[in-house]
Amino acid sequence: MLDKSLIADLPPFVGMETDSLEKLISAAKAQRYAKDTHIFRQGATAEHFYLLLDGHLRVVKVTEHGEQVIARYISTGELFGIAVAISRDIYPANAIAAVDCVALVWPNSVWQPTIEKNPSFATNTYRTIGDRLQETQDRLVELSTERVEQRVASALLKLVRQTGRQTDDGVLIDFPISRQDLSEMTGTTLHTVSRLLSAWEIEGLIKSGRQRITVVEDHKVMRIAHGQK
Amino acid sequence: MLDKSLIADLPPFVGMETDSLEKLISAAKAQRYAKDTHIFRQGATAEHFYLLLDGHLRVVKVTEHGEQVIARYISTGELFGIAVAISRDIYPANAIAAVDCVALVWPNSVWQPTIEKNPSFATNTYRTIGDRLQETQDRLVELSTERVEQRVASALLKLVRQTGRQTDDGVLIDFPISRQDLSEMTGTTLHTVSRLLSAWEIEGLIKSGRQRITVVEDHKVMRIAHGQK
DNA sequence: CATTTTGTTTGTCGGGGCGCAAACCAGGCC
DNA sequence: GGCCTGGTTTGCGCCCCGACAAACAAAATG
């Protein structure tokens, strides 16, 4: 049996009353997802919504020509797959575990009553959706007006902020991320990303290895992201 | 005094009970906005939400370097400026009248009670927000993976679908739209847009004049948008 | 009607970054 | 340990498209 303490302190649930919380958690199922497996697939009918208890996953849109675009990364403590909140009956993207993950899964039928009984939960989740809309629009602006160099730098900083772990070298992005992934976040090719990272490594701004990136001189990366120099 | 019949049949309000509708409309103020004036400004504190009763307006993000990106066009019957729905306290963009417009204006204080009393209104608006999120993400994918030619063609088709008016030449986009506007919708320059439109006009796909575009051969434009040929 | 403003067209040039290809490298796995 | 898969680096050539410039056309203004 799951305990409400698992989620009580997570942002989506702050302000919820204890009994509502207990009811909610009792309707959940915990589920493990191995690295690189799908939690749900683009185009599938949306029957559940999720909370990521542990791990990192990426939300990926696939075009009809097979190209992939990473819409966002989801980190521990975030809701995802909440198609039901915006009345969508299919998932608009794939969700793929970037590392081994644990998630709570609810059937969509739980959503409506929960929203109605818990205004603070409703507010929290709609704010989340707003955040994501805003973030997506910001990326749109970025993609429209800034050059590759700046976009890759921004993406690095966003990942660092979201999932950075302090090490003695600098701040490490705390899950495996390839050049290809970065290119799919920034609308370019892995070749270009590779070239940029190589250059930055030589200049000492970052350290990187196979699917590992550590930001050493975040000031300088920020300068690049903002187009100075 | 405003009458509820003004809005009763509009999508956001379908399913609302008559007395709620009357209450809502009685809290509204109608307001006229001349062409090219701002309804609200990016960064201003969000104190109202709006419904466009007549006209067309564009939602424009401005970057710190002064470049503009058109997030979307709003047409008659749509809600806009609903920052309050997603708990934002400032508007994330400018709203500018593309033609003379009439809008209903509500103070934000009306929002919460209306949402709570009218589940169908809540559902409708959250679906709208979902639609906009989805649309924004689709544009992100487009911008990441498709070339200028396809993006401009897609933008034309979207405008035609949203605001097209049948004429004997073809389908006219029913408000003034410049090459510059199109470039700000598609992440390119007005020069490139001008060249593309000129070429398409010679091939007979469209007819265009100063701030006027008519799509003649929508099949062919669709083919371009989908990258065939 | 003359003038100014604003949108549009068109030419030329150059470069950023993509496509393609090949070699390299690190881990995982047997 | 040795193979092999998948990630990374690097070189090269080309082309799309952005930058700049200038002329033009059509409204708007008075």
Image (cartoon, coloured by chain):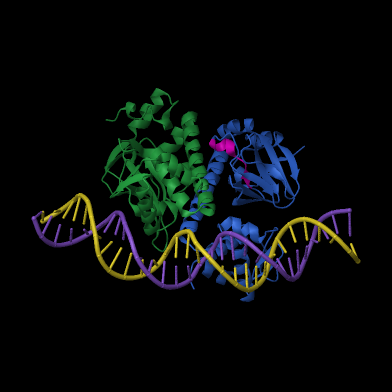
Chain colours: A green, B blue, C yellow, D purple
**Residue at 69% over, 38% down:** B105
Residue A72 visible (yes or no)? yes
Q: Nearer the viewer, residue A78 or B1?
A: A78
Establish if B109 lies above or below B172: above
Find out whether residue B66 is within the magenta segment: no
Q: Nearer the viewer, residue C2 or B157?
A: C2
How far from the left and from the top, in percent, is residue B196? 59, 68
Q: Which residues are magenta?
A: B78-86
Q: Is residue A93 left or right of residue D6?
A: right
Residue A43 visible (yes or no)? no
**Residue at 30% over, 27% down:** A3
Q: Residue furthest bottom?
A: B203
Q: Is residue B7 left or right of residue D8?
A: right
Q: Quadrant of the N terminus of chain B?
A: top right
Q: Is residue C4 left or right of residue A177?
A: right
How far from the left and from the top, in percent, is residue A42? 39, 53
Q: Is residue B196 left or right of residue B229?
A: right
How far from the left and from the top, in percent, is residue B217? 60, 72
Q: Nearer the viewer, residue B175 or A120?
A: B175
**Residue at 31% over, 43% down:** A175
- Number of numbered markers: 0
Q: Nearer the viewer, residue D23 or B32?
A: D23
How far from the left and from the top, in percent, is residue D28? 81, 56
> In the rendered image, which quarter is residue B20 located in?
top right
